[in-house]
Image (cartoon, helix red, strand yellow):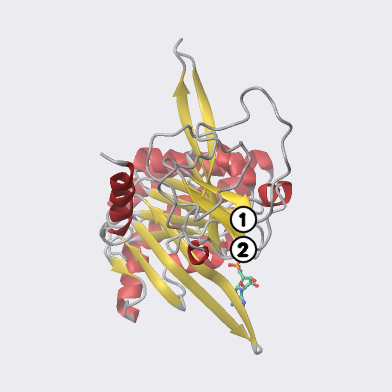
Amino acid sequence: MTVTESLGALEERARRQTGTFGDGALIVCDSLVRIYQSEGVEVQALQGLDLLVQSGELVAIVGASGSGKSTLLAVLSGLDVPTAGRVRVGPWDLMSMTAKQRVDYRRSMVGFVWQQTARNIVPYLTSTENVAFPMALAGMKRRAREKRAADLLDVLGVGYCADRRPAQMSGGEQQRVAIAVALANSPEVLFADEPTGELDTATSHDVLEGLRTVNRELGTTVVVVTHDAGVSEHVQRTVAIRDGRTSSEVLRRTHTAEDGTQSVVAEEYAVLDRAGRVQLPREYRQTLDLVGRVRLALESSHVSVWPDRPMPQRPPSGHGEHGPHGRAHGEPPTRTGRHAAVPAPTTAPTTTPGTTSSTTDEEAPR
Ligand SMILES: Nc1ncnc2c1ncn2[C@@H]1O[C@H](COP(=O)(O)OP(=O)(O)O)[C@@H](O)[C@H]1O
Ligand SMILES: [Mg+2]
């Protein structure tokens, strides 16, 4: 295979249709936009947000205040309709549901836990009565609902609170009862908006562990919104939202070393959205003074981003300063920046003679 054919194959692969975005995912947010109009001022709470959540996942969504987390959750829970984009949860298309479907969706498919405990549980009912209440509305027999209420309170570690009213419980206990209430009618997905926002660290830990238990033992998909960055210690996947878009993700994996010892490794990823946009972390932009125009280069295994200015000269040296094709490390791509799919070291940008000779200025990245 020649170098040129490899490049062609790469481009062909890029062009090929790969089905609809999010096929197979339980939750699909595709370029979601939510614009609020208040007193003539337009606020873009969601600015083309993409997010996929697979069935059975436990995902934390973090971000600064005002970044759009509650707006996203209101959309996903069927309380709000986005201005544009596509949003699906299981078989439910949340953009085109009728009012009746919206009620069905909220009753059968999803459960919610809000930050204010008072919004989740009724003050004059015991925990058992609170959890049994939605089941009674759904027509479940008394015996069955009392049994299920007891089971759910046990799963959340608050079985001992069964006969207590909210005023007789701590904030953390109340929130764990609230999770049980949200799960009463066996929803597939549980959404929680800052469920630990009013709690101290130790109590927050119990609530987050409660969500983790629910995810693991009941198989419920959980999406929990928080502004507490420490949440990523409790979940495998943390998605960060910045300015109404998903900007980065942290994935936690258990790594087993050769000697069998296990450790948890957290890796941070940038998110490439549907339009091909990626947010470069501020530290990276500041370190290399990347502003305005940058040059992109397609390498065989990665894409590099270069400042649009001459790089400082490196002192000459006997070895280790040049890549395999004669270009010094730290030197930007000179022409189109598009390179062939040849095996290349991933640490140094490479040029491949012969593949960029037809380049013109028009093709240069802007
Ligand atoms: N009902 C509303 N009317 C006008 N602006 C709103 C409304 N709800 C939220 N916003 C604005 O949208 C942005 C995102 O808000 P929100 O989703 O609540 O953020 P977060 O939950 O991440 O703090 C904020 O700028 C907020 O002021
Ligand atoms: Mg919020």
Q: CA distance from mark 2 to mark 1?
A: 6 Å
Q: Nearer the viewer, residue 4 or 71?
A: 4
Q: Position of residue 193 (x, y in %)?
A: 54, 58
Position of residue 64 relative to residue 341, above or below, is below
Q: Amino acid at mark 2?
A: Ser
Residue denoted by label 1: 63
Query: Is there any visible trace of residue 311 in the rendered image?
Result: yes
State left or right for residue 320 relative to residue 27.
right
Q: Is mark 1 within 8 Å of ligand 1?
A: yes
Q: Is mark 2 within 8 Å of ligand 1?
A: yes
Q: Amino acid at mark 1?
A: Gly
Secondary structure under the numbered disc 1 in the rendered image: loop
Q: Quadrant of the C terminus?
A: bottom right
Seen at 52% across and 39% down, the residue is 209
Position of residue 253 relative to residue 289, above or below, is above
State left or right for residue 137 relative to residue 292.
left
Q: Quadrant of the N terminus?
A: top left
The count of marks equals 2
Label pair 2/1, CB-CB below 8 angstroms:
yes
Q: Nearer the viewer, residue 349 or 269?
A: 349
Mark 1, Cα crowd under 10 Å, few <14 / some 14-19 / many 20+, is many
Mark 2, Cα crowd under 10 Å, few <14 / some 14-19 / many 20+, is many
Secondary structure under the numbered disc 2 in the rendered image: loop
Residue denoted by label 2: 67
Judged from the image, the quadrant occupied by ligand 1 is: bottom right
Query: Is there any visible trace of residue 121 in the rendered image?
Result: no
Q: Position of residue 316 (x, y in %)?
A: 71, 30
Position of residue 332 relative to residue 80, above or below, is above
Q: Position of residue 268 (x, y in %)?
A: 55, 41
